[in-house]
Amino acid sequence: MASLSFFNAMVTLALLIMLFMGSSNAQLSTDFYSKSCPHLFSTVQTVVQSAINKETRMGASIVRLFFHDCFVNVISLATDSSFE
């Protein structure tokens, strides 16, 4: 059950991120695959849930995969003295 609540938290986090991204002027779209692959979100959800069921640490690994570069760049900017 813990992996299910963790998965729900991850899905909520992903939806919040997409919500904030949708309010920007970027050309990205949350419905990009709606016509070419209408079952994309349910397929990804099934595969990610299966991976988390097999290995509970997989959820954290996926988050780390998506946000690693972002955090590394923010930290490097924060520690760069020429940035000031």
Image (cartoon, rainbow, N blue to C red):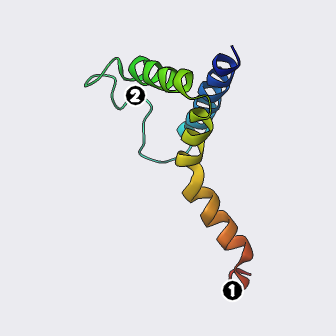
| Residue found at the far top of this picture | 1
Residue at disc 1, secondary structure? helix
Real-space CA distance between mark 2 and mark 1, rounded to the nearest whole angstrom: 40 Å
Instruction: Give the residue at x 52% y 24%.
Output: 54
Mark 2, other Cα within 10 Å: few <14 / some 14–19 / many ≥20: few
Q: Is residue 38 left or right of residue 54?
A: left
Which of label 2 and label 1 is nearer to you?
1
Quick check: can you spot residue 77? yes
Q: Is residue 19 visible?
A: no
6 in relation to 25, above or below: above
Q: Amino acid at mark 1?
A: Ser
- Which residue sits at x=73%, y=76%? 79
- Give the quadrant of residue 47: top left
State the image coordinates of residue 58 (x, y, percent, origin top left): 56, 34
The residue indicated by pointer 2 is 31
> Local crowd at mark 1 within 10 Å, few (<14), some, or many (≥20)?
few
Residue 56: image x %, image y %?
61, 28
Q: Secondary structure at mark 2?
A: loop
Q: Quadrant of the N terminus?
A: top right
Residue 4, label in figure: none
Query: What residue sits right under mark 1 in the picture?
Result: 82
The answer to which quarter of the image holds residue 31 is: top left
Residue 7 in the image: x percent, y percent? Answer: 61, 23
